Image (cartoon, rainbow, N blue to C red):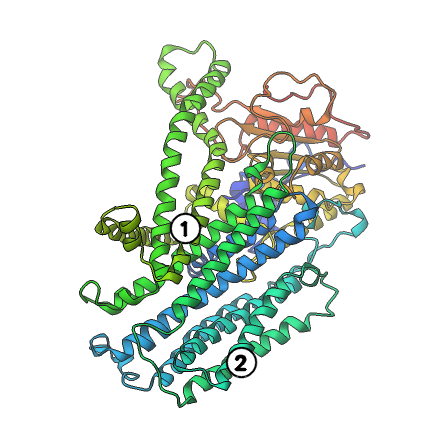
Amino acid sequence: MSDDVVELRVHGAATASAGQVLDVAQVEQVAGDRSGGFYRPRRQCSCRSGDGVTLEAYRWADLPSGTVVRTLSLVFLLPFMLANVAIWMRPPNPGSDALVRSLCRLLALTLTALYVLAFAGVTLDLIAWKCLGSPRCLDGRIWLSWLGGQPVGLRLATLAVVPAAAIGLLWRASARPREVFDAFRAPADEVSAHRLSEIGQWDAGPLVGRLRSIHVAAAFATLDVALLAARAATGATAGTVALAVASGTVLATCVILLCMPRLIDRSASDQRLDRLPRAVRTVAVALTIVVTVHVLASPAPWNEGSGLPGYGAILTSLFVAQTILLTALGAVLLWNRGRRRGGTPLLGLGALVIAASAVSLAVAVSAEFVYRVADFLDRDAPTGEGLASGLPPAFTWAFFGFLRAVLFTLVVAVPVVLISRRRRLRAATAIVARDYPGRPAAAATRLRQVQKAIARARFTERLIPFAVVYACLAGLGTATTTLGLLEWLPSESVQRYARLPGSLITFAIALGSWGIAAVIVGLAVGGIFAYRTVEFRRHVGVLWDLGTFWPRAAHPFAPPCYAERAVPELTRRIIYLVSRGNAVLLTAHSHGSVLAAATVLQLPPQVSSRVALLTHGSPLSRLYARLFPAFVDDEVLHEIGDRVGWRWVNLWRDTDSIGGWIFSAHGAIARVTVADPAATVDRRLRDPADVVPLPGDSVPPPIQGHRPSGSDQRYAEAARTLIERLRRPTDSGPPPGDPPTGQ
């Protein structure tokens, strides 16, 4: 058997170059392409080390990223990504699986309808109905004045093209052919039966296609309902009623299809009923054309009032539907919450937390979009006389609800931060005292810096109650928008029942509006810098990579999944290297360790027996096991260890706010004596290496936190140990000399 070992490095969320991953100046690509490729040091740079180990890097950073324009567009589609993540956060209880999937998909559908209504609010309500009928609004606007004074039907039919074109553009963008690559599909009998092994093993294209057809059909039907509601305000004709029934039937069909997981989640090879969603989509497109012609040609007079007839009622009804769905999802999650030892991740409400956040963000973005356009059209109109004053009350409640959710969350967060800070500092002080005994007084400042770094890193666990509180308040904010059905405004209602000044509520609503605008701008700026600045991406990009790791199973317009390519590509590469007589040391940092875990589950036994695993800064247990309990649990982690013969070392630091232990929690710092192979996996690295300057240096070593450990001597020692075990003819388990957790 060959002694050649390939150390295959998989980087984390930070946008690192292949040279940085390999720690060499010159590299050459040996497989893959610019988006995801395998690199080695150039031959002139001695690609093989003296001990027969060949370095190789898999760079996947460009798979989830893109251009600035694409990043900005995805900022506004962030609710779609959150809705897609929610469906993967369902509890491990299989009894509620189908129901949770259906509810998450229905909530995702309401987000599409909400965006369509936001576009309709701008084009049909603000411009076609109000602005084009107001000489003040048209004054000086040549780009609008050509439609001024035209019949209402012509104005509505003409401007209905804008939301229809937006739907078509989104449809076309999501249906673009995927990048062609020859991906490996492992034989079914060699792949793990655990759910995590599904990542990269099944073709999500047919599922996304079914969802896309349903969402496009619902989007066009929502636009039709808005047009027909305005037309029916002056008396519904037989044609109007017939078209309304047809549009309602399309919407009902979309809802029914999403409530049939067996139909939606069929395998890629089973295309027997794929014509049904496509047929519904075709009917919806044709129906929109007929509805537009009907609005244009209908001779009945129009009742020109202060706003587009029926628009506010439709919008508020959608908010009512979202409230009902969120309530139902919460009830299902609580009823089926697992009572397992060690607590339930996110109180069993992970899917609800993310779904409520998606709805809240979508409502906020939609309301802000409509109000900013109204503000632009109003120019310097006096307060209460502009176009914004006639917008549906539901949007005003949305601003008020957003501000209320943020403020109340902060009210909860401040005491939790203050109370937990003292406890976290005490724990950090104990760790520092153990790691750096007998240090001189001159190191006191550095010791305090290390204590604060450890305390900050431990704050990750405290974010869970904040997320639950915000989700509950966001859901409550969505529920209060239903008061728009009663035509109540926040200022009037709060002044009447809470005895607060109306001016204070008006100020709060304006503050909420500007707060939403600040969030949108912040997301846009963050989206740009996340792919242009390594340090920024290390902290912000991790959230994006977490969201785009999961295939699109709830919303077809969510960002594409990079794991669908990365996992099969890694699997194929490892099988190729082993077939050439090499053993493979798979090293992975941060989110790369999640890719590595899914890859190991797909390796054939004869290949995994020649593979060792070295993870560092891994979020597998600390984040993924909490957020996605149905896909990352103790069972799958032990299976990964079994597949590689427990040739697995995980390095973690107390100063890391993202990565952590796999099997041993913070408190496990003593030498492990039980005969459990999992007990030898985790190795805590003291960080920093020291609090005083090392010999020959003038400053203390830096605090590494979540940075990769590739340049750490302890990383090299762990890699060397695993390589020695790979070269043994027989290796039934970890050697007794392996350092345990906490050493």
Q: Residues within 10 Å of mark 2 (few under 14, many from 20)?
A: many
The answer to whether the residues at label 2 and label 1 have Cβ atoms under 8 Å apart is no
Q: Position of residue 9 (x, y in %)?
A: 61, 41
Q: Position of residue 395 (x, y in %)?
A: 36, 60
Q: CA distance from mark 2 to mark 1?
A: 34 Å
Relative to 114, residue 357 above or below: above
Q: Position of residue 166 (x, y in %)?
A: 45, 71
676 or 703: nearer the viewer: 676
In the displayed image of the protein, which residue is found farthest to the top? 438
Residue 313 sits in quarter: bottom left
Circle 2 is placed at which residue position?
A: 287
Please indicate whether residue 538 sits to the left or right of residue 622 in the image.
left
330 or 700: nearer the viewer: 330
44 or 48: nearer the viewer: 48
Name the kind of residue labelled 2 in the image: Leu
Please indicate whether residue 13 sits to the left or right of residue 141 in the image.
right
Residue drawn at x 45%, y 9% as measured from the top left = 438
Quarter of the image with the C terminus is top right
Relative to 471, residue 280 above or below: below
Name the kind of residue labelled 1 in the image: Gly
Please indicate whether residue 279 sits to the left or right of residue 111 in the image.
right
Residue drawn at x 45%, y 31% as measured from the top left = 459
In the displayed image of the protein, which residue is found farthest to the front? 497
The answer to whether residue 508 shows anywhere in this view is: no
Q: Position of residue 320 (x, y in %)?
A: 47, 59
Q: Secondary structure at mark 2?
A: helix
Circle 1 is placed at which residue position?
A: 477
Q: Residues within 10 Å of mark 1 (few under 14, many from 20)?
A: many
